[in-house]
Image (cartoon, rainbow, N blue to C red):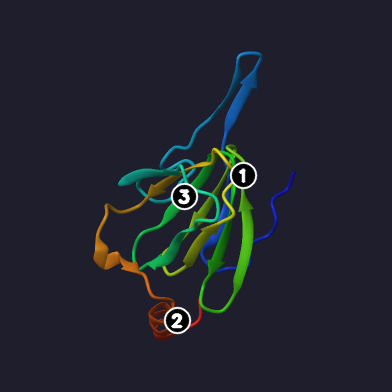
Amino acid sequence: MTPPALTAAGCRWLGLRGASDPRGSINFVEMDTDLDFPIRRAFWIHGVPAGQDRGHHAHRESRLLMVALSGGADVVLDDGQRRETVRLDRPDRGLICDAWVWHELHGFADGTVVLVLASTGYAESDYIRDYATFRREVGTRGAP
């Protein structure tokens, strides 16, 4: 199935290569082949209680690849001009989210695990956690 087109600048789907046989399926991602950024940090979101959200921030530098290893969640993407919501719910398809994109995760299914591969290590100064500040800062950067 073809994923929905994304309109937020700096966001795109990434089909994850893999294989399946009677023993099951495997998918993988490789730097320089699939990703055009280095992986400096990996983390996973899991155990999110019903009705709770994650994200609600943007990054000044970090680029992300998000993959729902199990379950699924809605992801809001906002580049300061366009806002859209997509469903992240397949382990064979990742969502690339560049810097300067506000992102929120909502509507987690039970048992959801989202793997995030980031281009930078953790630095609090990279985060924009207030939406008004994001709008102001992204506006000073010009149109995406």
Residue at image point 41% right, 66% down: 57
Residue at (27, 52) in percent of width and height: 121
Question: Residue 140, relative to residue 77: is it above or below?
Answer: below
N-term-proximal mark, 1 vs 2: 1
Where is mark 2, residue-wise?
A: 135
Q: Which residue is mark 3?
A: 65
Marks 3 and 2: which is nearer the front? 2
Asked which quadrant contains residue 126, the reply is bottom left
In the picture shown, does residue 139 fall above or below 50?
below
Find residue 15 and report its horizontal and vertical position in percent: 60, 43
Q: Secondary structure at mark 3?
A: strand
**Decide: marks 1, 2 in contact (CB < 8 A)?**
no
Is 45 or 137 nearer to us in this picture? Answer: 45
Residue 71, position in %: x, y? 59, 40
Residue hosting label 1: 89
Q: Is residue 106 left or right of residue 126?
A: right
Amino acid type of disc 1?
Asp
Q: Are marks 3 and 2 in contact (CB under 8 Å)?
A: no
Which residue is more in the foreground, 13 or 122? 122
- Of pointers 3 and 2, the one earlier in the residue sequence: 3
Q: CA distance from mark 1 to mark 2?
A: 28 Å
Badge 2: few (under 14), some or many (20 or more) residues near its Cα, within 10 Å? some
Instruction: Indicate the secondary structure of the residue bearing disc 2.
Output: helix
Q: Is residue 129 above or below residue 65?
A: below
Residue type pointed to by label 2: Arg
